[in-house]
Image (cartoon, rainbow, N blue to C red):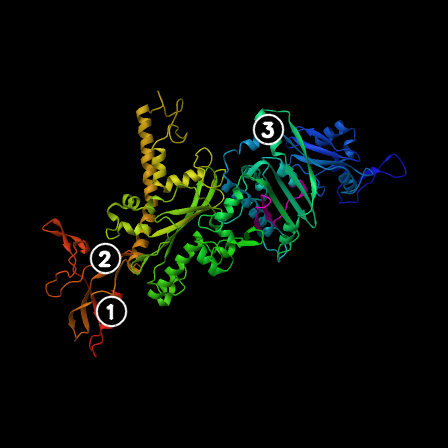
Amino acid sequence: AGGYHPACAQPVHLVPPPGCLDRRRVAMAPMAAPRRLHVHFCDAGEATEVLVPSGQDIRSTVSQKIGVPAHEIALELLDGEVAYDPALYATCSDIRAVRRCGGAARRGEGSAGSQQQQQPTVLFNFPSAKILLTTEGIFSQETAVYELLDNALESVYLRRRASGTPSSYIPQVVLLLDLERNILRVVDNGRSLTYGELVMWGQLGTSDHQKHGDSASGFFPVRYSRFGVGSKGAGKALLGEGGELSMARVEGGSGTKLTMPIAKMMAAAEEGDRKGEWKQPVSSWQPDAQVRALMGREGWGDKATCFEVLGVKGNTLAVVEAMLTQQGGLADKVCDKYLPCLVSDDPSSAARALPEMEGFARQPIRTSIELGARRIKLNDEIFGNGEVDNLRCSQIILARQIRDQHLEELFPQAAGSHSAATRAADPSCPSMTKVFDGICEADGKRGSWRLVLEYFPSINGSKSMPPVVEPGCFEVRWNGRLLSEERTKSFQFTEPAGAKELLGRGFPKDLPEAVWQCFTGTLYLDGNFAVDPTKNALLHDSSVDSLVQNLFRKWDSRAEKQRGHGSARSSPLSSPGFGSPGYGPGGGNSPREVASMRQQQQLDAAQKKKEEMVPLAKEMCAWLHECRTNVDEDVIFVAEGTDLTLRDVDAARGTFKATTNHVRISGKNFVAPFRDEESLEAKDPDPKKRLLVKIAVRKQEEFAEVCDFQFDGSFNTGSALRDSDVTEACRQA
């Protein structure tokens, strides 16, 4: 190390022991700014801000500005805890510089005193205001709330995965609605912001999500950050006139808070004031009683991050409160959007809520919406154990329970074993789920997808499909987050018309079109697929993400038709261009030949696509046929209150034929009028109560009156036929 000896004014150079790093030489090495930096030099007096252009040596520039020798300048993050390294913190816009105490001070000496004397600031200017303006129109008030929840959920996810996190830690996110003070807060106990990251939050466009690495691994990583302006843009969408946005963090009892000068920034941006700059102080912050109460909960820990919108627009919070526990209200939609985050690790709960996805790594997060003393625990609500009415996901889970109970009655040996992996107990029991999955590759990128379809059979003549889903379609989840506005809801092999086109004469004739309305499902995508700024739909733009284009052009027949069969811009690999060896004079290919080559390439691609999808269409048809044949109860003969007439009893064999005048088909009742047994005349003369059926008579379609419906039954040959035998046979018919 090198520095100044206290007894003299001459520098003293200390030789480090063998194998020890010479820190003086490291400190004096040139350090170029990776981007334009605001360096805040903190000494005994006022802090001085030095602007260092990208590529210039940081210490030399600061030294020239403030007149302190470069070797006496130490660079660190704004929190004063970590030395600044341009390779590790390339996205930082603001850093701190301090004077080395005694020339060779230890890390941190001289920092505390100057920090107490000088309140740090964050610079907001015209460019940052212009960036904020780009978020105009992106967020509705609803999607703004999702954006704030995204950040909080990601924060607790990262802390749970971090090394050194205590086993007692429970990830928690709370949405606080304060109608009396008109405040919306999102509070979490995640990794919290360091002092430097709090300042970075104020610098728009500096998202550091790439630093953590695992944004695309698996189907359920809670990695939603993308652009670096989300929370600010979302907060602005919620903000009323004269309101404030702030971010606060606390760790170990002490905290800091930064409030954005939104009103000044917007005024400058609208007026074109390019010279406007505002230094906003980073002030100390002590959590109020509301946040302290949260931090006292089980498993919370000593960290908290609080995003606050003070002065929410109009009557937004009152509207949210009125709809909060109703179907389609905020609680319902939040549960639906973040379902994988809300389901516990319990295998049975995961199987009920996320069928065929239980084996994938997932991080449950305790999440609630709170208004004063009222606390809505979303983790309980998804299973119907709460106050929210007709929650969409709880209705789907209930429909699965009803379906599985029906299967247990039909296949007792396979009770509780209806997944594809555990049906060995009774092979005749068909799986109510069908899984297709694969890897999508394009332009050096790889994306995983998994399509899980579920069959909901007719039970006792009524449909069991939950009314909150769209039959024959699937929803799309990206990193587990529901893309509620995604327009792609089916693939060619999951549609009857598409399957017929693929299979031709091989399409099963005994598979009615109605059966294609008996399933629903979910398409899971990993984080490698691009989404739009609101993260409510995929980015269907060939210039941005070829993975999305590759997957949906391949499987969605409508996506192909929407884009047309040809493109004005051909790929360099698909056709020769002017001046290439294969075009023009001497090249061997005329324009007509080139067009023919392109057409042939398109035909080859279509043929390859068909060859890949034909096996999938066959699997789809076979699965639907198996479910319909073995499980569906489309037509039910009804015994209660009907005309059960005996017919053709064979006492020797113990068999009989009987009739009823009432059947239920797909939930709709059909009742023929009571008739005289001999003349078959209807006892009710009202012609409107007739039941008609179309039949073919000499190749002509005619209407005929239905008299009754016939069914077979059996009884014990050792006793006479009883009425109860006929009733039971009717119920089982």
SS category of the residue bearing label 3: helix
| Residue drawn where x is 55% and y is 54% of the image | 375
Q: What is the spatial separation of the Cα atoms under label 1 and label 3, in whole angstroms?
A: 80 Å
Q: Which residue is mark 1?
A: 727
- Mark 3, other Cα within 10 Å: few <14 / some 14–19 / many ≥20: some
Q: Is residue 103 magenta?
A: no
Q: Between 434 and 128, which is closer to the camera in this rendering?
A: 128
Mark 1 in CB contact with mark 2 (< 8 angstroms)? no
First in sequence: mark 1 or mark 3? 3
The spot of residue 114 in percent (x, y) is: 77, 38
Q: Between 722 and 488, which is closer to the camera in this rendering?
A: 722
Q: For the residue marked with disc 2, what is the amino acid?
A: Phe
SS category of the residue bearing label 2: strand
Q: Residue furthest right?
A: 7
Q: For residue 670, which numbered disc appears in the image?
A: 2
Quadrant housing the C terminus: bottom left
Q: For residue 267, which numbered disc appears in the image?
A: 3
| Residue drawn where x is 20% and y is 75% of the image | 721
